[in-house]
Amino acid sequence: MSYKIPNAITSNESGWCPGCGHGIVARLIAEVAEELEVEDRVVMVRDVACGAMVSGVVEFNNIGGAHGRPIITACGAKRARKDSIVIAHPGDGSAYSIGIESTIHAALRNENILALIVNNSVFGMTGGQMSPATLIGQKTTSSPKGRDKDYNGSPFDVVKTLKEYDIAYLARGSVDSPGEVTKAKKYIKKAIEKQMRGEGFCLVEILSPCPTNWNKTPVDSLKMIKDQQKVFYPVGEYIDKGGNL
């Protein structure tokens, strides 16, 4: 079996660490845009974080948002250019901490964008500190003994927060196996199709490995997703307005 490199993927080095899941997510976006023939309409809104390096990997129109502000920036871009396919591309550290108000209120307004959130349960670019999505017991540079629920609170679960909202689509995927990557692509494609039809706010969270800040090999990082992340953050589709779950 052979695979064609998507048209939007460049030959540039990404800058992502070996085993990082961001590259897989970038390829999925490029594949979906090509299949839907919307490559010239895509506007990626990147964060000041690891996901920002997507701008050197895929040849889409892109906007550099302030840290924690890609979702609200995407809302403005979509309102200004309604014909664009707008994808906000933050991580969990951005979307669920400094940018949580943008995430919540974009959903409340049912903004017609896709928030594609890469969740690796840490602040990746700044050194692997605890994020809102860090698991209980998970060790980070700012929680060296592991996250303590009594001291640090519970991890933030975006699905539990938004599952009763009047939005177009809510799903969580993963990149820990080929089968899960295929499902994640389906979720991204469905969300973009919904945006094309003007159905409203779509959020797709992707569970992704961070071997560097997890202090694990790439293989062991995928195992951590399967054995720990997916236990606390179950994958699947949770809201599909107008669709069948």
Image (tube, grey):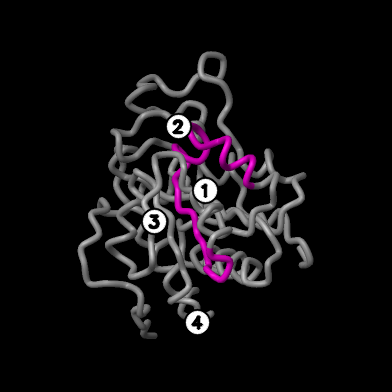
Considering the numbered disc 3 on the image, is that residue within a helix, a strand or a loop? strand
Ranked by sequence position, the earlier of labels 4 and 2 is 4
Instruction: Using the image, tell me which numbered label, if any, was put on residue 71.
Output: 1
The CA distance from mark 2 to mark 3 is 24 Å
Ranked by sequence position, the earlier of labels 1 and 4 is 4
Where residue 194 appears, x then y in whole percent? 66, 68
Circles 4, 2 touching at the beta carbon (< 8 Å): no
Q: Which residue sits at x=35%, y=80%? A: 7
Single out the residue that lies furthest toward the front: 80
Q: Which residue sits at x=39%, y=56%? A: 63
Ranked by sequence position, the earlier of labels 4 and 3 is 4
Where residue 198 appears, x then y in whole percent? 68, 67
Instruction: Using the image, tell me which numbered label, if any, was put on residue 131.
Output: 2
Circles 1, 3 touching at the beta carbon (< 8 Å): no
Ranked by sequence position, the earlier of labels 2 and 3 is 3
Within-10-Å neighbours for mark 4: few <14, some 14–19, many 20+: few
Residue 101 among those drawn in magenta: yes
The CA distance from mark 1 to mark 3 is 11 Å
The CA distance from mark 4 to mark 3 is 21 Å
Considering the numbered disc 4 on the image, is that residue within a helix, a strand or a loop? loop
What residue is disc 3 on?
Answer: 63
Task: Name the foreground residue: 138 vs 65.
Answer: 65
Q: Which residues are magenta?
A: 81-106
Q: Which residue sits at x=63%, y=55%? A: 171
Residue type (three-letter) at the residue carrying disc 3: Ile
